[in-house]
């Protein structure tokens, strides 16, 4: 099957790449999908929140595990 080099990189839909918002044939830009935008924002903020919580818990656990190994300063 021969490939057309002019069209080889022009259509990436369905391949996991982000779809660019391109003007429609009449020159207008399609409206933004606000429900999808808000859902992605909430997923991102939830991921960041839980990442911070897990990081703090790990730091506290590491401090508890490593602290007894530090020799006390001689007075």
Image (cartoon, grey):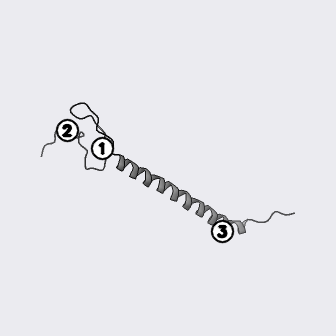
- Upstream in sequence: badge 3 or badge 2: 2
Please tell me whether mark 1 sits on a helix, a strand or a loop. loop
Residue located beneath label 2 in the image: 7
Q: Callout 1 environment at 10 Å: few (<14), some (14 to 19), or many (20+)?
A: few
Q: What percent of the width, then of the height, locates residue 26?
A: 21, 31
Question: Residue placed at 56% from the left, 60% from the top?
Answer: 53
Q: Which residue is mark 3?
A: 65
Q: Quadrant of residue 23?
A: top left
Q: Which comes before the other along the chain, label 1 or label 3?
A: 1
**Is 15 in front, or is 48?**
48
Gap in angstroms between the C-alphas marked 1 and 3:
47 Å
User: Across the whole image, how many numbered discs are drawn on residues?
Assistant: 3
Task: Identify the residue at image location x=59%, y=63%.
Answer: 57
Q: Is residue 54 above or below residue 4?
A: below
| Residue 43 drawn at (x, y percent) | 43, 55
Circle 2 residues within 10 Å: few <14, some 14–19, many ≥20? few
> Can you name the residue that lies furthest to the left here?
1
Disc sitting over residue 71 in the figure? none
Secondary structure beneath dot 3 equals helix
Whether residue 8 is situated above or below residue 59 in the rendered picture: above
Q: Position of residue 11 (x, y in %)?
A: 23, 42
Picture disc at residue 19: 1
Q: Residue at x 38, y 47 (%)?
A: 37
Circles 1 and 2: CB atoms closer than 8 Å? no
Q: Is residue 7 left or right of residue 58?
A: left
For the residues labelled 1 and 2, the Cα–Cα distance comes to 16 Å
Mark in front: 1 vs 2? 1
Tell me whether the residue at label 1 lies in contact with that at label 3, contact meaning CB atoms closer than 8 angstroms. no
């Amino acid at each position: 099957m021969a490939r057309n080099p002019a069209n080889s990189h022009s259509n990436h839909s369905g391949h996991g790449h982000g779809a660019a918002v391109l003007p429609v044939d009449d020159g207008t830009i399609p409206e933004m999908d606000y429900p999808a935008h808000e859902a992605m924002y909430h997923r991102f903020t939830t991921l960041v929140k839980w990442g911070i919580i897990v990081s703090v818990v790990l730091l506290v656990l590491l401090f508890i595990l490593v602290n007894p190994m530090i020799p006390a300063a001689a007075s």
